[in-house]
Amino acid sequence: MPHPLRRRIVRMVVPKYLVGAVCIIRDAADEGSLLLLRQPGHRGWGLPAGLLKKGELPHVGAARELHEESGVRIHPDDLVPAVPNAIVHAKGWVDTVFLGSVPASTTELVVDGGEVLEARWWPLDELPQLTPNTALLLGNYGIGPRAA
């Protein structure tokens, strides 16, 4: 079978996934607080996250999304891949997850008021209502109401 035809058939048959990057950012001073965002149209608080751009490395996309949504700057190389690093969702997307920390007391949180309404540090033992996807994702890492 000619290569172009074979490639076209494979692209039609193989499932396609959207790939995103998620940041779990803790307070560097005590690791007891977590950065969460409140977005319009969402019931509950979520993590800084977004889709990767074409050809963008996951850790670079995670750092970009973190800065765009919360104003927090972390060099991509300072983000550590979580274990497991990828969470595959049944509805057709994959989240690559990265861990990081910044000093909450000296890190200014800046939101645009459109995509993100509010960014805030929450103590791990006083987490607010989380979006269902956030609760599920954090549960994989032993955090929040869905922690095993």
Image (cartoon, rainbow, N blue to C red):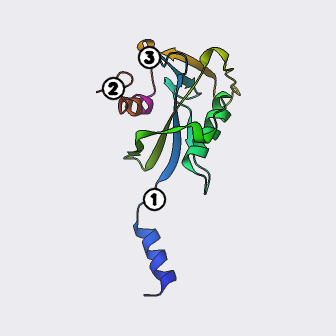
Q: What stretch is highlighted in magenta?
A: 131-135
Disc 3 versus disc 1: distance between alpha carbons?
35 Å
Q: Which of the two residues, 9 or 97, is positioned nearer the viewer here?
A: 97
Mark closest to the chain's N terminus, 1 or 2: 1
Mark closest to the chain's N terminus, 3 or 2: 3
Q: Give the residue drawn at x 57%, y 25%.
A: 37
Q: In this view, does 124 lie to the left or right of 68?
A: left
User: Could you tell me the amino acid type at mark 3?
Assistant: Leu
Vertical placement of residue 116 versus 84, above or below: above
Q: Which of the two residues, 92 or 29, is positioned nearer the viewer here?
A: 29
Q: Are marks 3 and 1 in contact (CB under 8 Å)?
A: no
Residue with the mark numbered 3: 124
Residue with the mark numbered 2: 146
Residue with the mark numbered 1: 16
| Other-residue count near label 2 (Cα within 10 Å), few / some / many at <14 / 14–19 / ≥20 | some
Q: Give the residue drawn at x 64%, y 23%.
A: 117
